[in-house]
Image: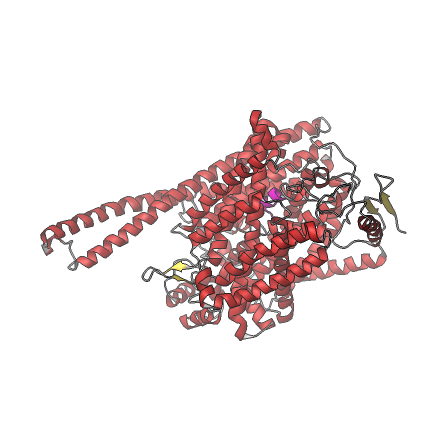
Amino acid sequence: MATIEYLRTDPDLPPVGVVDRTPMTPLKKGIFLAIAVLGAIAWAILAFVRGENVNAVWIVVAAICTYVLAYQFYARLIEYRITTPRDDVATPAEEMENAKDYMPMDRRVLFGHHFAAIAGAGPLVGPVLAAQMGYLPGTIWIIVGVVLAGAVQDYLVLWASVKRRGRSLGQMARDELGVVGGVAAIIAVLVIMMILLAVLGIVVVNALAATENKTTHVLEGGSPWGVFSIAMTIPIALFMGLYLRFLRPGKVGEVSIIGFALLLLAIISGNWVAGSGWGRDLFTLSGTAISWMLIIYGFIASVLPVWMLLAPRDYLSTFMKIGTIALLAVGVLFTMPVLRAPAVSQFASNSNGPSFAGSLFPFLFITIACGALSGFHALVSSGTTPKLLEKQSQARMIGYGGMLMESFVAVMAIIAASILDQHLYFAINSPNLTSAQAAADSVNKLGLSGNPTNADFLNQIAQDVGESRVYSRTGGAPTLAIGMTEVMHKFIGGNSLKAFWYHFAIMFEALFILTTIDAGTRVARFMLSDSLGNLGGAAKKFRDPSWWPGVFICSGLVVAAWGSVLLMGVTDPLGGINTLYPLFGISNQLLAAIALTVVLVIVVKKGLVKWAWIPAIPLVWDLIVTMTASFQKIFSGDPKIGYWTLHYNTIKSHDAAVPKRDALIAARNAFSASHDPSQLPKGITDPKDLDKQIDTLNTTISNAEKIIRNTFIQGTLSIVFAVMVLIVALVGLWVCVRAARNGGGETTESPEVPSKIFGPSGFLATKAEQEVQQEWDALIAEGKVRATGAAATAGSH
């Protein structure tokens, strides 16, 4: 029997919400039972079947079945017991609408923005690197972790922020934990945020940038296709924003079709532009050039009204993100590739993995930095999303559901890496290999299963995808691109389209990550503005995140901070991503610990101690993992793991190289003055050889100085981050104990304001919601109320 309640706040308006308490039908129960059985079978096959006959399809089945059950039951439990949404209460987007940062947004567009903002490098790069430990550990963490940790964090942080007028994570920490815990959280969050944005930028640069030939000084490689297509998404997004705001408000379907068609045109024409002489010259850019373009774009996207560029561009990008991942999933189901990686590899129990150093625990859980749990998501869930959320009941779909979608991206990434020949996988991810033969010799010594590889095989793979080489293409992006190519060329196009699919995948990865940078910059601006507002006096104006002088000041400071780290990473002799990614992973998960601590405190203060285990379980696990990883990065004597060990070893190498160089320079000067061959060092007869040795030592010294600087910064930050998070966790524990003893704590939630707008709860409206929507559409057509997100007109509600 259907039980539907209609929520009204104004007798002259239709209902503002629909609460459907209809019991689950026997048919639905049967469907969910079948899904559970199918998922259990898939998990059993992955866990117990060994050999080279495990199909990648079972990972897809296990993931989808788990996600469906988690969303239907675990997320619903959280909704019933903790968040208890009320659609008759206005969200910050409705209450504080100002057409700049606050405005109610259609749930589908907001889902696209939120997903695009949270889905960055982590779900693509992390699982690819983690595949060196085998497919099973990473798959378990990605799927189980998101259900119990990542999606829980995202949903609860979004709920908490919506209840507090969209306050940032740092400000909520200050309000809930007091001065000591709050200040520690704000400092940690802001600094960590800069590291995260910089690393995301490095991944984009690595995917798109060309490298300079040291002999000819000509840029080679790069992805002019990706640069052009990504650049074109900016004017397309501006058009979509203006279309929804002024031309056809509320017509999300129309603008979606138009935007998708224009996006396809940009992708297809990008291939043509890259193949033309002028296009290749114009859009083949160096890493430094692309870095500056990212910095400028991040500033512009942060200061413009959210409806004009950021939200429509993220929504547009989501078409490609979800579309490509869905196409890859269908390709896996059709081609049924076999997992070539072992379930658990030899590198799970030692620190000798070529892709990254460190054993399975704790480094697997920080390498997969976003697919299962990501502190960065908490910044988005307390940044742009709560200021755009139309209805409280939509938080489950956007917060929990959006994170499940990102987890599926990570699942497809680990599949793409695990179906590759293992010799090829490690040849791609082993650094500093100088030739195809050297790469083959190196990976053949690793004791991998299967037949040994050879230089001809590696050269053929490179030729097939239109690259000069595939060995030592570290960072994860090339591996994912080749893995996607292996699936897609068998599904669509055959061998002739291998190069197309490879470069399409590279462009897809860059677009995927770039949307996180623009949203992240805006979120960091909100946090910095909130923090400066706490200073009082004239700085109180910063409490208004839409105050224009504050917008420009905070945006400028934010992009200057992460932009400087980005430029440092792009010029890092160790490749930037190799040294910064471990810090990225640790700091990201430390950020998650701060977010979960804040959420736990809020839950306990509300008197919900019985349900505090929901955020407490992931918090305890996250603290164990991150503190162990931080300890090893600070104190490990292995230079591949410990920042300080590498720092001091490099100082020794630098100090040994400087006297050698100085002696050679003195010998060269003496020879130049006397032209006496006896002045040349022993074993050198040609002055040109002397010059070459001096140049080599200069390069060695210069690189060593950069490594010394970078490892000092990274080692220092590792200590600061760990200390700050421990302070936050201990203060949070003290506040929880005190609140539990008192039966609750003082609320910091904002006063409730009645809602005057309507929006369906889920992605697809129910029959009852469709009927209510028709009533609102009739009033919109009569001009009595305006469509959600439309520009205000005189006399409109």
* Residue 375 lies within the magenta run: yes
Q: Is residue 688 above or below residue 666?
A: below
- Counting the numbered discs, the total is 0
Q: Considering depth in this image, is 590 or 18 the residue closer to the camera?
A: 18
Asked if residue 494 is positioned above or below residue 213 in the image, the reply reads below
Can you give x and y, in whole percent of width and height, for residue 8 in the image?
84, 41
Q: Is residue 541 above or below residue 8?
A: above
Q: In percent of the image, x 70 and y 59: which residue is there? A: 39
- Tell me if residue 577 is in the magenta stretch: no
Task: Return the x and y of residue 571 as percentages of the image width and height.
Answer: 40, 50
* Highlighted range, magenta: 373-380
Identified at 69% across, 55% down, the residue is: 66
Closest to the observer, 247 or 350: 247
Q: Is residue 45 visible?
A: no
| Coloring scheme used | secondary structure
**x, y percentage for residue 555?**
53, 40
Camera-nearest residue between 301 and 523? 301
Instruction: Pick whichever, 90 or 64, lies toward us.
Output: 90
Q: Residue furthest right?
A: 1
Predominant SS of the magenta segment: helix
Q: Residue furthest top?
A: 537
Q: From this viewpoint, is residue 203 visible?
A: yes
Up-down: is 270 above or below 549? below
Residue 773, percent from left and from top: 81, 51
Work out which quarter of the rendered image holds the C terminus and state it. top right
Q: Residue at x 61, y 45 (%)?
A: 377
Please give left or right for residue 749 compared with residue 310 in the image: right
